[in-house]
Amino acid sequence: MLPTAAAAFSFDAEQFGFDLRKYRIQAHLDDYSTIRCINFIRSEVAAGRDPLPALAEAAGAPGQGARPWDDDKYLQPVLAEDALLFHDFGDEDTAPGGPGDPEVAHMFREEAADAGPSRGESTPDDAQPAEPVGQPANALVVPGKGKAKLGSRSAEAERVDRSYFDSYSYFDIHREMLSDKVRTDAYRDAIERNPGLVKGRTVLDVGCGTGILSMFAARAGAAAVIGVDGSSKIAGIARLNCSANGLAAEQGGPISIVTGRIEQLDGLPVDQVDVIVSEWMGYGLLFESMLDSVLYARDRWLKPGGAILPDTATIYLAAAAEGATGLDFWRNVYGFHMDPVRQELHASSLHKAVVAGVAAADIISEAVAVKTLDLATMSVADADFSSDFVLTHKPQAGQTCSTCHAVVLWFDTAFSARFCPDLPVTLSTSPHGPQTHWAQTILCLRQPILLGQAPASGTSPSGSGSRPAGALRGRISIARSNKHRSLDISLEYAPVAADGSSVGPADTLIYSVAMSA
């Protein structure tokens, strides 16, 4: 990372023979074209392609629509909090209405801000570190050759990791998590109301954030607490928080904060720990792959027989009505139907999982557990799994049939009696309880399926004539994606009668749960 956007432009000019400041004048790029161009270059480099031939060809292109970045998808930042998108080119080209027109530039920066993460406020461009536009982290570079070089797979993973850790460096996301009483109360109670668990022990807090779990452990009497966080900014804040509460090691308190990815640390202030605590769960439990880091810490630093909190996690599925998808909103908007919007959103939801809160009233089947993980014994590979399921219709009040539009996924994590004998605690993200910041993960079906226990009149949405299905039978597979810190979910399903006979066609859908780059 370089200290300013200007330094990044100079680096690109020296290393790759490409100066964006000169290129935007040569190619007559206005501010909107510049943001598209920057994001185009970053997307090409991230994909392992050399953007320079396309840039050279586009410099002589006749106008809008003829250049590869003229698609509005390139208004969406590729790199979170990209300082280059906020650079003021006004001093370099200030012709009215041209690339440096201040009014156009102001609109451009507003749009770039809207398109990017909204977790915190941006600082002025010259105060932000900038990544050279032609080079991802750890890219293989030959200086002076004027060509962008192919970044390795690990370089792309490193870029995603930076985006991941950076996303946790803003206070809004920490306020959201701390304000989640279900989450925070569960951790507090497990740590503080099981006196034999932490008192006099050494505790490792993986992904410590603002330090709240470390401070719970200190208040519970831990002899030493080591908090680790991959965001240097938030680790610094954790140190200040611990100091403000008189708990920092420098003050004679028990807490030490270490900056860095747990897998990349050479060591900790101690050789082994008695307890590992971490709030590692992502959407659908496994999104963001932080579980891998917790298991690494367990294998590297946890004493034999040591405790890990939470120690189990279970994923549940249930069938859901259209209200769970949110698509019913578009059927009547102040008396107007907006089916084109509903249809487009539905099409997108067939390959991207939706994360949103689901009302208990929209759950129309019994829930089934499809996977339980034991964090004390599992391997990293156990997080990839397939499981069969049968979702049996649950009659609603006054209704014998319901229409299934989606399958909903949620999870519970437990601080079980194995390590918390005085007060076992369960943290549930079920739609039948208070909502949490994890909400639920919604997998929309291609066609609605009628579920019920009695025949319905007319033609059913499942294509089964007048005969509703008694259940939805299928198989769910969840695996880490080739895209770092992302998930792939495969859902195979078919409507069946109570006797197991087929009532309608089978279908298979594959969804992604991915980080915004």
Image: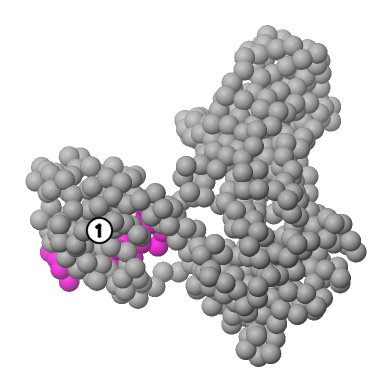
Return the residue at label 1.
Answer: 141
Left or right of 191? Residue 25 is left
- The amino acid beneath tag 1 is Val
Q: Residue at x 43, y 57 (%)?
A: 158
Residue at the right extreme, as displayed? 422
Q: State whether residue 313 appears in this view.
A: no
* x then y, percent, for residue 26: 10, 56
Q: Choose between 285 and 304: the one closer to the eye.
A: 304
Secondary structure, magenta segment, majority class:
loop
Does 486 appear in magenta?
no
Left or right of 123? Residue 410 is right
Image position of 333 with respect to 81: above or below: above
Q: Quadrant of residue 328?
A: top right
SS type, badge 1 = loop
* x then y, percent, for residue 174: 60, 66
Left or right of 440? Residue 511 is left
Q: Choose between 411 and 66: the one closer to the eye.
A: 411
Image position of 317 with respect to 6: above or below: above
Start and end of the magenta stretch? 76-96
